[in-house]
Amino acid sequence: MASPPHLLTLADLSVKQLKSSLTHAAYLKRVSLPILQPRPHGSYTLFPPKTLSDKTIALLFSKRSTRTRLSAESAAHLLGGHPMFLSSADIQLGVNESLQDSARVIGGLVDGVFARVGDHSEIVTLAQHSPVPVLNALSSLWHPTQILADLLTLLEHLPSPDPLPTAPISSISPGHSIPADAVPGDLPPKLDFDVLKGLTISWLGDSTNVLHDMLVTYPRLGAKVRVAVPKEYPCPGEVWDRVVQLGCDKGIDWSDDPLRAVEGADIVVTDTWVSMGQESEKAARLRAFAGYQVTEALCKQGGAAEDWKFLHCLPRKPDEVDDGVFYGKRSLVWEEAENRKWTIMALFEYVPPFFLLVGCASWS
Ligand code: CP
Ligand code: NVA
């Protein structure tokens, strides 16, 4: 896509860029949390640098959001920037004015755009005509920021066979400085990406935007993805083309059999069966997805690993996962939701769409 760089799916990022943004998210989390929580040794507080000072990010949301909106607003604030939330009821976004015209006007007034849209073609149009970077906050096809948060959560919770030492800040966050009296506990642990290698990640349910970013990401990091989706709801061709282009199809087992999908599962993931905008299809969808609910019994019958963990992007309905799993010891959903903030913060500051905002000289 034409310059400036945009991020519409994680398929747009190289493996190196994915790892760098996650490492940067862990760093930002480590230095930002003390603002909210007293430090154990109490000697000083680290703050993220105000790299977005005097910058405005337009949050254009044509669909509801709790996590993505709160994460983006609070992350931009912590970086000293101004998040400007605009719903489709507030501005002329495809109403009274074409998306193309709105994109040009908005891009002349702000420094970056974080957009949640309906049909994916809308964010493509925004990106094609925006003079500033556009980052996808969810579209019908993709939800890239969700999978970054899922990855950070896994990297934090999967046991590393050989715990790695603290990462030297200079190596993970170019341009950031750290007080000379920092102690190891202030620094983020070095993320062990090897814990993802050979992992089996299972998906039960609909072929949603969340699954699609998993498909173009996990196989590139060495994990296997086992999917069970009813035949009536296949993966959209536009998504599968990106999966194949990246060679990710070799790491995916796709069927309509929930028991097959959870075989050997280390992580089980699902999403709503009725995504935003599909409400009129609810009755038919509930019928089609019967038997796909994530439960202890199903995972045991299918042969999931003893200590499998559970992820869900939220908001959750009891249809797709029962209370026992959702509120139980396997569930990482609350940590996952909190990590939306740190991963979005890293994107705002660091990855291709937005590094222009802060004048980062390089991205690697
Ligand atoms: N997971 C997620 O995107 O949540 P919201 O729709 O509340 O932003
Ligand atoms: N697939 C869901 C994800 C919500 C975060 C939806 O698009 O509504």
Image: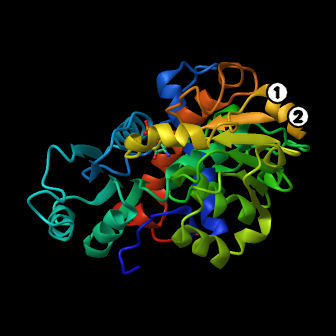
Report whether residue 176 is seen. Answer: no
Label 1 SS: helix
Q: Circle 1 sits on which residue?
A: 297
- Pinpoint residue 89: horizontal percent, then vertical percent: 16, 43
Name of the residue lying farthest toward the left: 96
Is 345 placed above or below 331 here? Answer: below
Closer-to-camera residue (320/94): 320
Label 2 SS: helix
- Circle number at residue 301: 2
Seen at 41% across and 57% down, the residue is 136
Is 361 placed above or below 135 here? Answer: below
Using a 10 Å C-alpha cutoff, classify the residue at mark 2 as few (fewer than 14 neighbours), some (14 to 19) or many (20 or more): few
Quarter of the image for residue 252 reads bottom right
Q: Amino acid at mark 2?
A: Gln
Q: Amino acid at mark 1?
A: Ala
Seen at 53% across and 20% down, the residue is 37
Closer-to-camera residue (26/118): 118
Cβ atoms under marks 2 and 1 closer than 8 Å: yes
| Residues at marks 2 and 1, CA–CA distance in whole angstroms | 6 Å
Seen at 61% across and 33% down, the residue is 320
Quarter of the image for residue 186 reads top right
- Circle number at residue 56: none
- Pinpoint residue 159: horizontal percent, then vertical percent: 84, 38
Where does ligand 1 appear, by image quarter?
Answer: top left
Q: Quadrant of the N terminus?
A: bottom left
- Pinpoint residue 42: horizontal percent, then vertical percent: 58, 20
